Image (cartoon, helix red, strand yellow):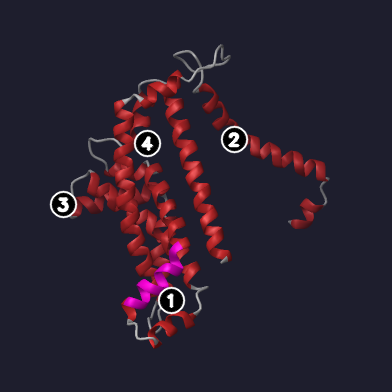
Amino acid sequence: MRGLFSDLPRSLLSALYWAFILYLFLPLMVMMAMSFKDANFIAFPIGEWTFNWYVTVMQDKQFLDAVVYSVMIAAATTMAATVLGVWIAMLIVAEGIRGQLIIFALAVLPAVVPGMISAISLRIFVSTIDLPTGTAAIILGHTVHAVPFVVVMALTRLRSMPGTLVDAARDLGADSIVAFYRVTLPYLGPALMGGMIFCVLLSIDDFVRTFFLGGYRPTLPMLIYAKVQSGMSPEINAMATIVLVVTAAVGLYAEYLTRRARTR
């Protein structure tokens, strides 16, 4: 495969690369452009450019309530996923534990299961345990989906950690709990920060599980979906652009923290 592409002219490879980039980003660029249109409908050409739709969005009580609700769910999801993910990662790298490969496979399984299958199975599960749909059910579903990402990031950091650090702490009189809080947890800090940011993004953007597990109070994706059903307008584009810019910035920062953790 490498030989096949190496035989192509450099100019052609460059053209294919930029064509692929355009294919990926052109719909997003069109969406963002339409959010500045001074009209009540989405279509070209754009006569005048305006920020009025962004002002409307920031004054929309439904939008602000959905943002607060989504952030609240994301915060709870991140806390639960971080605790579970670190515990599972510590279990995988611990000595004398059997079936560590099986534990790892089960831990990351929710990340590879199709979203629709995961959502349906979670809906059946919450119905079986008589957990009503709503906030608690959404947090449960989002946590199940977010744990694998924390596990992978924590494992990457733990496997690069010198074992002598914990041994030195124990030689100085620290027990297992003190050694974890004073040595292991600070060492995991950069990886956990990146994992927590990814958990927040996964929770806020999770539509399928929220659709199956949600109640009457909409999260941000559910609100945008409901507004799309009643007709497209530049206000929806403005909402989507705000979400896109914020999540992209946070995601890039999480990637920076992850790369930093790997090089330290």
Q: Is residue 233 visible?
A: no
Chain part drawn in magenta: 178-189
Quarter of the rendering occupied by the C terminus: bottom right
Q: Which numbered marker is on residue 130?
A: 3
Q: Mark 1: which amino acid?
A: Val
Pointer 4 or 3: first along the chain:
3
Residue, disc 1: 93
Instruction: Give the CA distance from mark 4 to mark 3.
Output: 26 Å
Pointer 2 or 3: first along the chain:
2
Quarter of the rendering occupied by the N terminus: bottom right
Q: Residue, x 28% and y 47% (percent of image)?
A: 138
| Residue 205 or residue 131, whichever sits in front | 205
Q: Mark 3: which amino acid?
A: Asp
Q: Are marks 4 and 2 in contact (CB under 8 Å)?
A: no
Q: Are marks 2 and 3 in contact (CB under 8 Å)?
A: no
Q: Mark 1 packing: few (<14 Cα in 10 Å), some, or many (20+)?
A: few
Q: Mark 3 packing: few (<14 Cα in 10 Å), some, or many (20+)?
A: few
Q: Which numbered marker is on residue 221?
A: 4
Asked if residue 75 lies left or right of residue 153, the reply is left
The chief SS type of the magenta part is: helix
Residue 117: % across, % down: 37, 50
Q: Is residue 178 visible?
A: yes
Instruction: Give the CA distance from mark 2 to mark 1.
Output: 40 Å
